[in-house]
Amino acid sequence: MKTLQFREALREAMQEEMRRDESIFLMGEEVAEYNGAYKVSQGMLDEFGAKRIIDTPIAELGFAGIGVGAAMNGLRPIIEFMTFNFSLVAIDQVINSAAKMMQMSGGQFPIPIVFRGPSASAGQLGAQHSQAFENWFANCPGLKCVVPSNPADAKGLLKSAIRDNDPVIFFESEQMYGDKGEVPEGEYVIPIGHADVVKEGKDVTIVSFGKIFKTARKAVEEMQKEGINAELIDLRTVRPIDYDTVIQSVKKTNRLVVVEEAWPLASISTELAYKVSKDAFDYLDAPVKRVCTADVPMAYAPTLVDAFLPTVNQIIEAAKSSLYIK
């Protein structure tokens, strides 16, 4: 094992895949000369050259479309959005071209493309730069949606995403790029669609993904001090969702709390609550609990940022409520 920052794990994944396959290239704003807005692509221009590490204008719709066309013609693009807030400008290409082309062409045009970049909040960035888009894109058939929470998963899942013949949306976080963690040495991939049972437990199942998973983990650690033995699951991907792992856990613990950094309406937590209620209703000893963001645009003031995001205390309260502990 070696210790890498989240950004370094992403870089290693892209470098290893680009050395393995010359059809792969990276394109986006500031990815080349500036070494990436968050230094994810640092040094890659020097290694792979300007034909494979390509700076773009501030024109997300344009370079997303170029990426889709390149994928249709046998290349394997990695398209970096400086933030997924900017992907809204390109959403027509992502949804109406990348996601649907395989089906519309009768299988003639697979689209092996990865759209990656940071999603959700990142401190005081205001309402227009703090939105989570995981559930937006997960709603669309034809896309796969990956949301790693740590460097090891980031590397293994990004390598799988790059090798996949379907379009993959790969969500990161500005606040995770500096996170450090142990990453396996040598070649490894993590299959898309497999959740990780990070901690086994018997009292309540806690499910989360992405950056907010770290908050869920802290809550589980605090509950352990109070004698509550929670099972903790990192979903890793939100399309496809590993329903089986969640349901098997609920059959053991009989309770479920889903923690998500997203607005509550039509969220991933809503989908999990429905699926567990449908397929494991007889095992539930309490209603499924959800801990989401406040149902408002995120404000700029630090106090309102704190009030907007899920907290350790909210997660503990939800778990205790499902256990009928006051």
Image: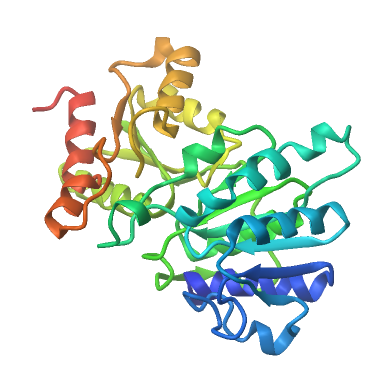
Q: Residue furthest top?
A: 282
Rendered-image quadrant of the N terminus: bottom right
State how the image is colored: rainbow
Tell me the residue at 72%/45% (across/down).
98
**Eyeballing the image, is 153 above or below 260?**
below
* Quadrant of the rendered image containing residue 224: top left
Q: Is residue 256 at all visible to an observer of this figure?
A: yes
**Eyeballing the image, is 3 above or below 106?**
below
Left or right placement of residue 181 versus residue 52 in this view: left
Residue 96 percent coordinates (x, y)? 68, 38
* Quadrant of the rendered image containing residue 145: top right
Rendered-image quadrant of the C terminus: top left
Residue 226 percent coordinates (x, y)? 15, 43
Q: Residue furthest left?
A: 326
Left or right placement of residue 291 versus residue 118 in this view: left
Tell me the residue at 65%/49% (across/down).
168
User: How many discs appear?
Assistant: 0
Left or right placement of residue 323 versus residue 268 in this view: left
Q: Which residue is at the front of the view, 288 or 22?
A: 22
Q: Which residue is at the front of the view, 272 or 74?
A: 74
Q: Is residue 192 at all visible to an observer of this figure?
A: no
Tell me the residue at 35%/44% (across/down).
261
**Eyeballing the image, is 55 above or below 290?**
below
Residue 106 percent coordinates (x, y)? 89, 32
Left or right placement of residue 19 versus residue 117 in this view: right
* Quadrant of the rendered image containing residue 121: bottom left
Residue 149 percent coordinates (x, y)? 45, 56
Q: Residue furthest bottom?
A: 46
